[in-house]
Image (cartoon, rainbow, N blue to C red):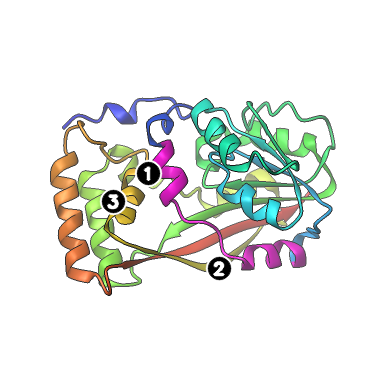
């Protein structure tokens, strides 16, 4: 089976998935802001660097909180999508750059967020860059919406489809960086907080959600058609009112530097 979509550099893997990503990836629960306020000192006046910001899904939550957001995203297609979506926000500043070389001045931001992206970074170099750009006492929040594969029979079936049809990366476990690895990078003050999150998706939304993942075959790639057929059977078997529920654990690894 052709898995050439696994060979792309991390900065290019989502170029052909921007529309699916922007429309169908889950957002982040409102409780995330409460957590950052309580544990990290986030206020509406905080300047936040959103690293690996993609199409701006987390940036939007911060903007609505009143924050100035410096978004750093190396993929031009994703960055352009964010520019289109958030052009009306004067507090949104969107720049090319990487986690290892953001271009942000020393001690410039009150906090750093990384949503669904840290596994693509060079961990030690990114951690050093984060320490350089954050103000003393500023926070780092590494965030993943992790599928709760045991939450329902549908979620179990969805995971089976991912493992059966996805690339090697889908089965590698690399998407979620181990806690011990993150603590080695950011120190013993790192804590894990788990929030609940979900999406309710119709058929087009479910298909778009699956195709937003860089490790699943797109139309025209080997394995795409049988994968979509299996997904449709799973949808039909578990739909309630024309929708299925995607369940997530929103994992937030949080520390202050």
Q: Is residue 30 magenta?
A: yes
Closest to the camera, between mark 2 and mark 3, is 3
Q: Which mark is residue 207?
A: 3
Check whether the beta carbons of the residues at disc 2 and disc 3 lie within 8 A of each other.
no
The residue tagged 2 is 195
Mark 3 element type: helix
Q: Quadrant of residue 82?
A: top right
Mark 2–mark 3 Cα distance, whole angstroms, equals 25 Å
For the residue carrying disc 3, how many other residues have a C-alpha within 10 Å: few (<14), some (14-19), or many (20+)? some
Q: Residue at x 44, y 26 (%)?
A: 12
Q: Nearer the viewer, residue 174 or 18?
A: 18
Q: Residue at x 62, y 56 (%)?
A: 253
The mark that comes first in sequence, 3 or 1, is: 3
Q: Which mark is residue 184?
A: none
Q: Residue at x 27, y 68 (%)?
A: 242
Where does the image place residue 227, in percent across and percent down from the top left? 18, 47
Where does the image place residue 71, in percent across and percent down from the top left? 66, 37
Where does the image place residue 226, in percent across and percent down from the top left? 13, 45
Closest to the camera, between mark 2 and mark 1, is 1
Q: Residue at x 25, y 30 (%)?
A: 3
Q: Main secondary structure of the magenta part?
A: helix
For the residue carrying disc 2, how many other residues have a C-alpha within 10 Å: few (<14), some (14-19), or many (20+)? some
Mark 2–mark 1 Cα distance, whole angstroms, equals 22 Å
Q: Nearer the viewer, residue 192 or 13?
A: 13
Q: Quadrant of residue 219?
A: top left
Mark 2 element type: strand
In the rendered image, the vertical position of residue 91 relative to residue 75, given as above or below: below
Q: Nearer the viewer, residue 42 or 199?
A: 199
For the residue carrying disc 1, how many other residues have a C-alpha within 10 Å: few (<14), some (14-19), or many (20+)? many
First to last magenta residue range: 18-38
């Amino acid at each position: 089976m052709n898995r050439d979509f696994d060979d792309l550099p991390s900065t290019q893997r989502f170029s052909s998935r921007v529309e699916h990503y922007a429309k169908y990836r889950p957002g982040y629960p409102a409780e995330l802001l409460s957590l950052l306020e309580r544990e990290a000192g986030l206020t509406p006046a905080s300047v936040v660097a959103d690293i690996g910001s993609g199409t701006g899904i987390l940036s939007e939550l911060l903007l609505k909180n009143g924050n100035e957001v410096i978004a750093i995203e190396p993929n031009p297609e994703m960055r352009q999508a964010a520019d289109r979506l958030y052009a009306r926000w004067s507090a949104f500043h969107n720049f090319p750059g990487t986690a290892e070389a953001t271009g942000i001045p020393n001690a410039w931001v009150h906090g750093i967020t990384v949503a669904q992206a840290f596994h693509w970074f060079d961990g030690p170099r990114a951690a050093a860059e984060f320490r350089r750009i954050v103000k003393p006492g500023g926070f780092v929040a590494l965030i993943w919406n992790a599928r709760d594969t045991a939450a329902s029979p549908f979620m179990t079936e969805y995971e089976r489809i991912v493992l059966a049809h996805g690339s090697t990366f889908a089965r590698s476990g690399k998407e979620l960086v181990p806690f011990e690895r993150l603590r080695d990078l950011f120190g013993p003050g790192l804590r894990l907080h788990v929030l609940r999150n979900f999406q309710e998706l119709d058929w087009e939304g479910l298909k778009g959600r699956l195709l937003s993942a860089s490790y699943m075959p797109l139309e025209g790639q080997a394995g795409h058609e049988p994968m979509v057929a299996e997904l449709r059977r799973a949808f039909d078997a578990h739909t309630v009112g024309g929708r299925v529920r995607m369940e997530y654990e929103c994992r937030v690894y949080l520390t202050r530097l």
